[in-house]
Image: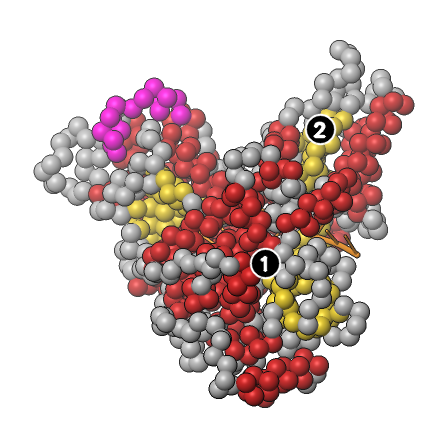
DNA sequence: GAGCACTGC
């Protein structure tokens, strides 16, 4: 709407507002108005109450500066520490200035996590006195809570916006894009930053706000600087947290778990009431530490019940069932007697408590300085998890968890010198630690021609990019010139690893797309097998009953089918030692993938005879995973991966009855030893037939595997001409 | 004879 628009009368709260030239005074008058400018309804009583609370947020005090900076600049970097109110307020300020609803546009605000996108959208809908899903909404995988034509402020996951960018590289629905929590440097946020840097140059009408923590601001300012040297302007808002006193050890601790337990008990004996948060690295470590803390704390209470209160220890990690995760919000235990010492709660958690989950009432943080981090080795194409020292930024984030409700203390189990000298400033962004096959394809689909010269915030290693391009070329997603193919364009549409998508797309040729659809869904959710420590035998026996001897991939299909047949029986997953949560998720994913298949007219077909069906599934598997093949070498059950010659063993969870000569595996895991996990028997002749360029023997490294392939090749050549019983030939060219 | 840091589409 613009000045002089005759359809507006002077009583309208937004009368005289010029998009992007709105002042803070104007916005404030609209906020105080009795009429909601977006619904034209009178504001509720609750609206006024919330507005008073909003006015106390630090960011509110800087409205004037913000509106001016937004008017004057296309790109802004914003820093707002915890408690500043930036995530809820800035998008609203933008909406009042940008007035996207008057131009059929939207303001998007991205979040790295689904729950954040949902809960912030709900809060902001309340603040704006609108119904969630109307003017204010959110969009996450499996749930689009927006109304086309009505929603103008949309919270969404960063991955969701990246998906949209693939099909509309200009992101033309948006007038302003806000990237929140940019300092977390998720893969999706990093890619979006690269795409948006180029996009703001193409689209002068698009505004961009990058919100981050203090430490990264200058880097982003420089990255988004215009015309060479001039950095993007910075908008800074102070936080509102309580002080946290930090303590270091005098000497390095040789055993951080032991030191952590000791520190927790020391706090319990000697410090004022208040809950403790201890960071450890993984499930096993956490369960173990909980047991030990509980034992020792009980001892202390028994020895000295007059001065030591009761203690409860609560584990927290993502694979814990939601009901058990809820225990972190329980109040601490009550004193044993009315006048006895107060109880204390200890939460022992993975990194999940560093960003994803906030626990109120934490006063003490114990930080041993480690976490499990993903690392990618492009040489052997393997992602693995390694216990590594955290960064300074991460240590600060952990310490901050002690000061949410009142002043707190953080005990770092390393020396101050190590903190200053040894810890990296920032955790390496995910883009430097991941296999980029998926990312490269997404970028290509978003119209990026030259991946090596793309303007990344942090450029990945050239070898990582080469590996990604190589894989995409082998599965025919990219042609030999490096251009995206028609097939590659469809592969990119599936929310799957490219190999899985390729396998799914070709599966109708093998008449088993129904089963491959199930398999891809099962492979994209967390482990479905549950194996409680005290019932391992029972769990393994239950698994054996559902196993298919030719391979774990077939077992996964069988499990899904049995699950669906027994859906009426609420106890079925439980009695079979399977995760109901993971299976429900698989079902959900399967439905989503099915819709994408329908969009591209990929037929859903199956073969009635189970023997033939399983054979077809294994052949289809070769079409996607021919790069993940191992050959049996020697008599002791050892395998060697093809081409990169890694010596591996079948993972103990593998359910095959024999050790076949050729197998395809879903993942390579490096734990106590190198293992291949989720494994299925295949035949050499299939590999040669479905991936001839990859199995081109001329370029193959010498060894047992090559000789075996050569024999299969010779046999095949000898048979040619009198054997036409091969798989169904391509009927539809993609 | 072992594990599953955390997100996201």
Query: Relative to residue A60, is residue A497 drawn left or right?
Result: right
In the picture, which quadrant includes the N terminus of chain A? top left
Looking at the picture, does residue A515 appear above or below residue A357?
Answer: below
Residue A320 within the segment the image draws in magenta: no
Q: Position of residue A435 (x, y in %)?
A: 56, 64
Residue wearing tag 2: A345
Query: Relative to residue A474, is residue A17 drawn left or right?
Result: left
Q: Residue at x 37, y 61 (%)?
A: A602
Asked whether A165 or A66 is in front, the reply is: A165
Q: Residue at x 22, y 29 (%)?
A: A40
**Figure coloring:** secondary structure
Name which quarter of the figure residue A138 lies in. top left
Q: Residues within 10 Å of mark 2 (few under 14, many from 20)?
A: many
- Parent chain of label 1: A
| Marks 2, 1: nearer the viewer | 1
Residue wearing tag 1: A553
In the picture as drawn, the residue positioned furthest to the top comes out as A338
| Main secondary structure type of the part rendered in magenta | loop
In the picture as drawn, the residue positioned furthest to the left comes out as A6
Asked whether A435 or A398 is in front, the reply is: A435
- Asked if residue A77 can be seen in this view, the reply is no
Q: Which residues are magenta?
A: A35-50
In the picture as drawn, the residue positioned furthest to the right comes out as A303
Query: Relative to residue A212, is residue A167 drawn left or right?
Result: left
Q: Residue at x 33, y 41 (%)?
A: A146
């Amino acid at each position: 709407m613009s000045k002089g628009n005759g359809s507006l009368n002077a009583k309208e709260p937004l009368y005289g507002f010029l998009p992007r030239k709105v002042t803070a005074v104007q916005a404030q008058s609209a906020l105080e108005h009795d009429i909601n400018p977006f619904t034209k309804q009178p504001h509720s009583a609750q609206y006024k109450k919330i507005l008073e609370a909003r006015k106390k947020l630090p960011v509110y005090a800087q409205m004037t500066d913000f509106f001016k900076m937004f008017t004057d600049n296309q790109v802004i970097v914003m820093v707002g520490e915890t408690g500043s109110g930036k995530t809820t307020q800035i998008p609203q300020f933008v909406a009042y200035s940008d007035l996207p609803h008057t131009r059929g546009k939207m303001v998007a605000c991205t979040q790295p996590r689904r729950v954040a996108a949902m809960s912030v959208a709900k809060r902001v809908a309340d603040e704006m006195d609108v119904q969630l899903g109307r003017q204010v909404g959110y969009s996450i995988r499996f749930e689009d809570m927006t109304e086309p034509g009505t929603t103008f402020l949309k919270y969404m996951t960063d991955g969701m916006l990246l998906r949209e960018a693939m099909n509309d590289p200009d992101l033309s629905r948006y007038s302003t894009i806000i990237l929140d929590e940019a300092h977390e440097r998720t893969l999706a946020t990093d890619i979006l930053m690269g795409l948006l840097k180029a996009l703001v140059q193409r689209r002068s009408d698009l505004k961009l706000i990058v919100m981050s923590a203090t430490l990264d601001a200058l880097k982003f300012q420089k990255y988004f600087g215009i015309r060479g040297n001039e950095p993007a302007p910075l908008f800074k808002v102070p936080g509102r947290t309580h002080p946290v006193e930090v303590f270091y050890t005098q000497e390095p601790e040789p055993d951080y778990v032991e030191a952590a337990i000791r520190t927790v008990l020391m706090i319990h004996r000697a410090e004022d009431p208040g809950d403790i948060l201890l960071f450890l690295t993984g499930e096993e470590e956490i369960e173990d530490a909980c047991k030990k803390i509980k034992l020792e704390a009980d001892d202390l209470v028994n020895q000295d019940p007059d001065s030591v209160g009761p203690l409860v220890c609560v584990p927290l990690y993502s694979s814990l069932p939601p009901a058990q995760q809820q225990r972190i919000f329980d109040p601490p235990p009550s004193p044993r007697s009315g006048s006895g010492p107060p109880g204390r709660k200890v939460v022992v958690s993975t990194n999940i408590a560093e960003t994803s989950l906030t626990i109120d009432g934490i006063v003490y943080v114990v930080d041993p300085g480690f976490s499990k981090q993903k690392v990618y080795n492009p040489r052997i194409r393997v992602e693995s998890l390694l216990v590594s020292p955290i960064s300074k930024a991460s240590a600060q984030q952990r310490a901050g968890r002690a000061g949410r409700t009142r002043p707190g203390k953080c005990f770092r189990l390393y020396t101050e010198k190590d903190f200053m000298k040894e810890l990296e400033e920032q955790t390496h962004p995910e883009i430097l630690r991941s296999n980029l096959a998926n990312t490269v394809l997404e970028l290509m689909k978003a119209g990026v021609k030259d991946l090596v010269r793309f303007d990344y915030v942090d450029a990945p290693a050239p070898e990582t990019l080469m590996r990604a391009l190589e894989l995409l070329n082998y599965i025919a997603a990219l042609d030999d010139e490096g251009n995206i193919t028609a097939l590659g364009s469809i592969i990119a549409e599936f929310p799957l690893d490219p190999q899985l998508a390729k396998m799914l797309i070709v599966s109708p040729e093998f008449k088993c797309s129904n089963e491959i659809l199930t398999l891809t869904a099962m492979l994209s959710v967390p482990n479905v097998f549950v194996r409680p420590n005290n019932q391992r035998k029972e769990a393994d026996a239950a698994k054996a009953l559902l196993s298919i001897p030719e391979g774990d991939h077939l077992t996964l299909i069988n499990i899904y089918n049995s699950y669906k047949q027994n859906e009426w029986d609420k106890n079925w997953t439980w009695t079979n030692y399977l995760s109901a949560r993971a299976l429900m998720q698989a079902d959900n994913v399967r439905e989503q993938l099915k819709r994408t298949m329908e969009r591209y007219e990929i037929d859903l077909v199956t073969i009635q005879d189970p023997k033939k069906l399983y054979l077809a599934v294994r052949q289809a598997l070769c079409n996607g995973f021919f790069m993940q093949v191992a050959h049996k070498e020697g008599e002791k059950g050892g395998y060697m991966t093809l081409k990169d010659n890694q010596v591996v063993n079948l993972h103990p969870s593998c359910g095959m009855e024999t050790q076949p000569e050729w197998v395809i595996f879903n993942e390579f895991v490096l734990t106590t030893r190198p293992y291949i996990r989720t494994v299925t028997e295949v035949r050499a002749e299939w590999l040669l037939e479905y991936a001839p360029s990859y199995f081109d023997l001329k370029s193959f490294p010498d060894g047992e595997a090559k000789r075996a392939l050569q024999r299969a090749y010779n046999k095949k050549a000898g048979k040619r001409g009198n054997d036409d019983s091969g798989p169904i030939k391509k009927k539809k060219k993609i």
